[in-house]
Amino acid sequence: MTEKYYGHPKFYEMVEEEAELHSCKNRDYTRGGDPLGNFKRVSAVLKIWGFDVPPEVVALIYMMKQLDATMWMLSQKYEGEVETIDSRLADVSVYAKLARILKSEALTEEKDYLWVMQEDIASQLP
């Protein structure tokens, strides 16, 4: 994979590892449904309680949790027993990508919604 790319070869190995990590975790979270459904469901539940947190922000909050744990582990000079610094940083990277996808989807849905609204308004004009 690294032959056609510039940059550190380990970077591309990590990207492949993250793809595998995302696939394995996604299988548990979605069971074949919407690949980003868990973020959308959490967003919907939060709305019930009066918190308007879009799915991409849910992903960023999850990412911040992992980043916070990483920073704490580094400051306390320990590796972690259940999740290591490396595994948490891999999660941070995956969450960042998922937040990008969710934001992109939100922009597309917003444009689609605005288009439908424009058509609806136009249909009501004389």
Image (cartoon, helix red, strand yellow):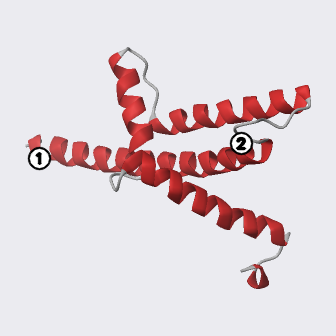
Residue 97 screen position, x and y as percent: 60, 52
| Element on which disc 2 rests | helix
Quadrant of the drawing holding the N terminus: bottom right
Label 2 crowding class (10 Å Cα cut-off): few <14, some 14-19, many 20+? some
Residue 36 visible here: no
At 36% across and 25% down in the image, what residue appears?
45
- Work out whether residue 81 or residue 86 is closer to the camera in this orientation and state it: 81
Classify residue 101 as left or right of residue 33.
right
Does 63 appear above or below 30? above
At 42% across and 31% down in the image, what residue appears?
42
Q: In the rendered structure, are the residues bearing label 1 and label 2 in contact, judged by CB atoms less than 8 Å apart?
A: no
The amino acid type found where label 2 is placed reads: Arg
At 75% across and 36% down in the image, what residue appears?
81
Label 1 crowding class (10 Å Cα cut-off): few <14, some 14-19, many 20+? few
Q: Quadrant of residue 113?
A: top left
First-in-chain label (1 vs 2): 2
Quadrant of the drawing holding the C terminus: top left
The amino acid type found where label 1 is placed reads: Ser
Q: Which residue carries the number 2 mark?
A: 88
- Work out whether residue 100 or residue 20 is closer to the camera in this orientation and state it: 20
Of tags 1 and 2, which is closer to the observer?
A: 2
Marks counted in the figure total 2
Residue 96 screen position, x and y as percent: 63, 47
Residue 11 screen position, x and y as percent: 78, 65
Q: Which residue carries the number 1 mark?
A: 123
